[in-house]
Image: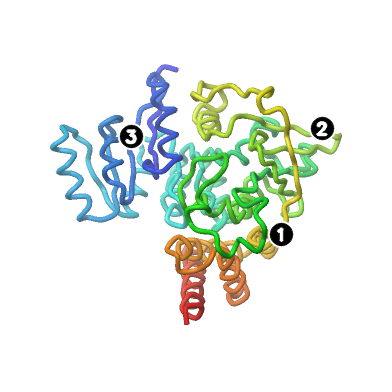
Amino acid sequence: MTTRQRITVLGATGSIGQSTLDVILRHPDRYEVHALTGHSRLDDLLLLCQQHRPKLAVVATATDAAAFSERLRKAGLATDVLHGEAGLCEVAAASEVDAVMAAIVGAAGLRPTLAAVRAGKKVLLANKEALVMSGALFMQAVRDSNAVLLPIDSEHNAIFQCLPGGYAQGLAAVGVRRILLTASGGPFRETPLAELADVSPERACAHPNWSMGRKISVDSATMANKGLELIEACWLFDARPSQVEVVVHPQSVIHSLVDYIDGSVLAQLGNPDMRTPIANALSWPQRIDSGVPPLDLFSIARLDFHKPDEQRFPCLRLARQAAEAGSSAPATLNAANEVAVAAFLDRRIRYTEIASMIEAVLAKEPCVVLDSLDAVFDADARARRAAEQWLTQASR
């Protein structure tokens, strides 16, 4: 490689962003940081700017941008500061950029991720909500722009690695019978059902295998995260919901499997560390060192598999129903889940009420065709209003 790839990291201060920057630091001959974005964790963003010296940084507001520019100046850095969604879209689509890590959590990541796609970038997709909310529009934009879309979720990256040439050409064309999407089962896989109503945010965020942000940790505990991944897998690999089976695998060593019609089942294994899929996508179609230690099968000793209990994990059932309904149902599901998780983390609702809110919003909101990005965000806004109304009624 004669020139270094220039990388924009959307969501640099989150766990995926920081893991990405760790991999980049290990390969200064291959990669350089063009832009870093953060929302409100400006102390963390400042440290990252000092370490990586990006050309641009993006923060939430104009006020934040002015204050952050002054902090950068005092630190002796020449980094320019942009703000808001427009700033995010600018650094995602910048002509100098070769690859974009799309790691902003939730619906907020959709427009900048789509901006990178429309600009024909190599897009490392960690923001599953982009596909959940606008799958048809998003994948059409990928085709129209010839962008390279590489999945970062450990499960989808595992599937990607187990498919011929990395890319799905339609599952039937390559002899795939089904996709087996693994899930750890989270911290409450064996907790008595009667105790779940009293689960605290702290317990829900204590994942047994992975180090993640609070929202994603709660999603993993409820398995809403796996439901969103099921929807994402359908779009990424052109699969029907019936072709995607969720398997609870507590060790989190097998990250997913692909079952072929000849009886072969290919699995991707590795230690539970997001630097592995990040390094795979950054360097694809080559391989680079990620900093992750080799897998020690002798210390693991056993691998267990279970069917998911939909009584314990009703969010998974709701996500599959939304995937089968299609149109605006996945966007509605995602919006209701974001509101519900935020309310749970703020101690406004019980853990078990997360699924109750989502189910109520899905039942209330009509399922409509989403033929534009405006329609996507309209559906998202309607679902959020319905979720807030549910919250208001529940608190009476």
User: What residue is shown with label 2?
Assistant: 264
Left or right of 118, for residue 181? right
Residue drawn 45% across and 69% down? 348
The residue carrying pointer 2 sits among few (fewer than 14), some (14 to 19) or many (20 or more) residues within 10 Å by Cα, namely few
Horizontal and vertical percent for residue 86? 32, 53
Q: Nearer the viewer, residue 29 or 76?
A: 76
The residue carrying pointer 3 sits among few (fewer than 14), some (14 to 19) or many (20 or more) residues within 10 Å by Cα, namely many
Task: Give, as a three-letter code, the residue at label 1.
Answer: Glu
User: What residue is shown with label 1?
Assistant: 310
Element marked by disc 3: strand
The residue carrying pointer 1 sits among few (fewer than 14), some (14 to 19) or many (20 or more) residues within 10 Å by Cα, namely few
Q: Against 359, is 95 above or below? A: above
Task: Give, as a three-letter code, the residue at label 2.
Answer: Ser
Residue drawn 43% across and 48% down? 104
Say whether marks 2 and 3 touch (CB < 8 Å). Answer: no
Q: Which mark, residue 34?
A: 3
Residue drawn 67% across and 58% down? 192
| Tag in front: 1 or 2 | 1
Q: Against 38, is 298 above or below? A: above
Residue 186 seen in render:
yes
Q: CA distance from mark 1 to mark 3?
A: 44 Å
Mark 1 and mark 3 lie on one chain; the one further toward the N terminus is 3
Mark 2 and mark 3 lie on one chain; the one further toward the N terminus is 3
Left or right of 78, for residue 117? right
Element marked by disc 2: loop
Q: Nearer the viewer, residue 1 or 191?
A: 191
| Tag in front: 2 or 3 | 2
Q: CA distance from mark 1 to mark 2?
A: 28 Å
Element marked by disc 1: loop
Task: Give, as a three-letter code, the residue at label 3.
Answer: His
Q: CA distance from mark 2 to mark 3?
A: 42 Å
